[in-house]
Image (cartoon, rainbow, N blue to C red):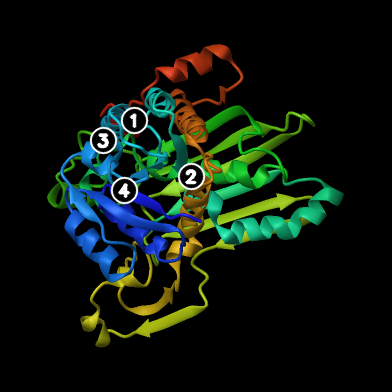
Amino acid sequence: MNTLKLGFIGAGFIARFQALAMKQVRNCELSAIYDHTGAADLADYAKKNGLGEPKLYKTVAELCNHCDAVALLSPNYTRIEMMEQIVDAVKKGAELKGVICEKPLGRTVAEAERMVHLAKEANLLTSYFENQLHMNSINNALHQLRPQQEVMGGFTLARSTEEHAGPHNAWFWDPTRQGGGVLSDMGCHSIAIGRHILTPEGKSTTFLKPVSMQCDTSLLKWGQPKYKKQLLDKYGVDYSKTPAEDFATGIATFKNPETGQLLKAQFTDSWMYDKQGLRLWMDALGPGYAMEVNTLISPVEIFIGDEAAEGVADAETALEKSTSSRGLLSVLPNEADLYGYTTEIRDAVNSFLNGKNALLDFEFGAEVTFLVQAAYMAAEQKKTIDLTDTKVINDLKTYQSLISQGKGADILFS
């Protein structure tokens, strides 16, 4: 099999995590990096870890001429501009096979649909990076339970939670650049994985049809005076003026079009989880059987006492977004694989080399964006919205949440 040469646009947190995952994937190398903040350090990491000999390029056009596929890992507010430059490079002769986009595909339905259109315009294969649908723990559990589902029927309720104490970067906290708060940042994961768990074996990723959405968004921690000051001092983001939600919870209802059965996907996401660090928790209930995943249950534990804690260099080497450097701590030996990053890269690489879209393509990513924006709309209207209503569907095409407009104070402080 040939090698897929990847070019990275973006060299921040998620790009470094993807590079870590690439160490476990064959038939790919990192050959090009867009020369922006952190690019030199990422290139150095790639060389030291046998991921390739990437060169830095000052323009997107140059990068596109020195790789087979581009991974769009830059901040949310840059995605459309970067994608337009990728398409322009292809029209001018760059021989790209495909393009990868880290979640979310767009900050609004209109942005996501624009990304789909641009990829089609350039005849590019696509991969939407939603790592949780690639988690082996979830998919192995589903495989194990398929015989029970054949006898008893499928899951009827899936619950998904992603929580940690908050993002790393200023733009993530800024709803006008990120596209919202925790619902935009992590709700896309939780809504998508809930639907995935409920989907019958052998059916497409969009087999279940959205019926309704209900949601509540709140500002529970980071709107308090002490923490608003922390955000302002550290990141320059003023949550007294332009707040985003730090907690969101809701229920997406789907219908099985073959049986007519209604299924529930409950989601909860927060930036106020002041415990060990990042926690992904999912469970699902079927008639007579169940499954549960908790990423904080680790086969490895360490203990660091107060005296020894002075020697801690970086608590995040043990666990993403760790908030503690002492006490009894969980160590996750292979976070990149646990969270599904390794499998999603492998899927993109193998798919592109075989001339097809990845399991999750841009059109799937656009539907996830649609569901996330439906959740924002439901929270604003304080009611369950009907996703089979043509008017609601059309309204969502031009909808932009108040929070992402910088008007979150109107609903989060009332």
Please tell me which residue is depicted at 80% across the width and 32% down the height of the picture.
259
- Give the image location of residue 220, x and y in percent: 35, 46
Residue in the foreground of this view, choosing between 286 and 18: 18
In percent of the image, x 42 and y 40: which residue is there?
97
Q: Label 2: which residue?
A: 352
- Mark 4 vs mark 3, foreground winner is 4
Q: Amino acid at mark 2?
A: Phe
- Give the SS element for disc 1: loop
Q: Amino acid at mark 1?
A: Ser
Q: Which residue is mark 4?
A: 7
On residue 414, the disc is: 1
In the rendered image, residue 148, in percent from the top left (x then y), is placed at 81, 55
Q: For the residues carrying marks 3 and 2, which lies nearer the camera in this image?
A: 2
Say whether marks 1 and 2 touch (CB < 8 Å).
Answer: no
Does any portion of residue 175 appear in the rendered image? no
Residue 199 location, quadrant: top right
The residue to which callout 3 is attached is 78
Give, as a three-letter code, the residue at label 3: Thr
Q: Residues within 10 Å of mark 2 (few under 14, many from 20)?
A: many
Q: Amino acid at mark 4?
A: Gly
Q: Between disc 4 and disc 3, whose residue precedes?
A: 4
Instruction: Check if mark 3's residue and mark 2's residue have beta carbons within 8 Å.
Output: no
Farthest right residue?
151
Q: Mark 3: which secondary structure?
A: helix
Point out the tag, 4 or 2, that comes first from the N-terminus: 4
Q: Mark 4, residues whose alpha carbon is within 10 Å: few (<14), some, or many (≥20)? A: many
Percent position (x, y) of residue 326? 32, 78
